[in-house]
Image (cartoon, grey):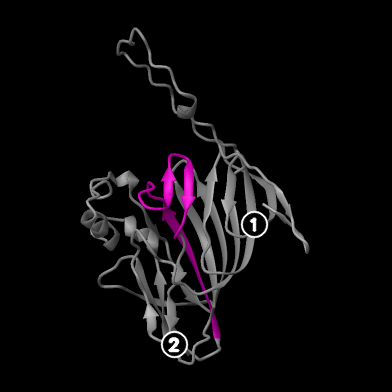
Amino acid sequence: QVNYTIDVSLNDESHELTGFVKMEYINNSPDTLKYIYIHLWPNAYKNDRTTFSEQLLKNDRTDFYFSDEDKRGYINQLDFKVNNITAVTEEDAQHIDITKLLLSQALAPHASVIVTTPFHVKLPYNFSRGGHAGQSYQVTQWYPKAAMYDKDGWHPMPYVDQGEYYNDFGNYTVHITLPSNYKVGATGVLQGKEENVTAAPKKVAAPVVSKTKKPFFPKKEKETDAVMPSSRKQQTLTYAVENVTDFAWFADKSFIVKTDTLQLPTHTVTA
């Protein structure tokens, strides 16, 4: 079992996440563990030499391979600690989205350790079930995540365009900070919302005067082309969920939230 507490904030100008994760790793196996494999799946979008990139090429998709640097993604600024002591990691020789976290003291059966690290993610354009399209965010496979250990041993796996869901179950508490006019859909149940943070004033670039001749019949801007400005106020949303294998969240300023209820014999369900 791996329980996660995550604090994360979104910069919707640079499409970046800044976060901190705490994992409570509980060894429910009968084996003594000397290391823990960690998935760093955002690195699958770092260059065109990853397993993800090669898989797309084999499936006749070249959009990622030929994409510009600003559409790529990665995870960095990691500083792993185990029980508050700086830990050593070993990079995987083949996969930049997998690392091995060495334990200074072996983890006995039924014992647990606390693993922590800050992290920074450059979100990619949404090539594969996660990322962003403009300021619409689909945040999946986004945080340092422990790999599965079972009777067959460790199961470290690079990110590909399918799968990644053979994970340990655990409890999640996630605090998401972003501009207050975003609507968010996330794993778990919303526990609370705070709007007590004010963002720094955004720099407004000087207008560029074009000397090109204007078309006689200018193209009308569609309503969907207009970019809704982000609020300078920030909100922090807290979600909690028990006994799941992953946590994802989606955010968009144009989401429309609808709710309804279903009355069951034993209780009422609100969705």
- Residue 236 in picture, x, y percent from top left: 63, 51
Task: Tell me: 46 left or right of 271.
Answer: left
Task: Tell me: 69 left or right of 31.
Answer: left
The answer to whether 32 is drawn above or below residue 139 in the figure is below
Which residue is denoted by mark 2 in the rendering?
33
Q: Main secondary structure of the magenta part?
A: strand
Which residue is denoted by mark 1 in the rendering?
238
The answer to whether 220 is drawn above or below residue 71 in the figure is above
Q: Quadrant of residue 121?
A: bottom left
Q: Which of marks 1 and 2 is nearer the N terminus?
A: 2
Residue 131 appears anywhere in the view = yes
- Residue 192 in picture, x, y percent from top left: 70, 54
Three-letter residue code for mark 2: Leu
The answer to whether 61 is drawn above or below residue 222 in the figure is below
Q: How many labels does the image show?
A: 2
Neighbourhood count class around disc 2 (C-alpha, 10 Å): few under 14, some 14–19, many 20 upward: some
Neighbourhood count class around disc 1 (C-alpha, 10 Å): few under 14, some 14–19, many 20 upward: many
- The residue lying toward the viewer, choosing from 184 and 208, is 184
Q: Could you tell me if the residues under marks 1 and 2 are in contact, i.e. CB atoms within 8 Å?
A: no
Task: Tell me: 164 left or right of 246.
Answer: left
Please provide the residue range marked out in magenta. Answer: 112-141
Residue 178 appears anywhere in the view = no
Q: Does the magenta stretch include residue 87?
A: no
Q: Which residue shows up at 64% across the image and 52% down it?
A: 237
Three-letter residue code for mark 1: Thr
- Residue 161 in picture, x, y percent from top left: 34, 58
The answer to whether 142 is drawn above or below residue 235 in the figure is below
- The residue lying toward the viewer, choosing from 268 and 165, is 268
Q: How far apart are marks 1 and 2 (CA)?
A: 33 Å
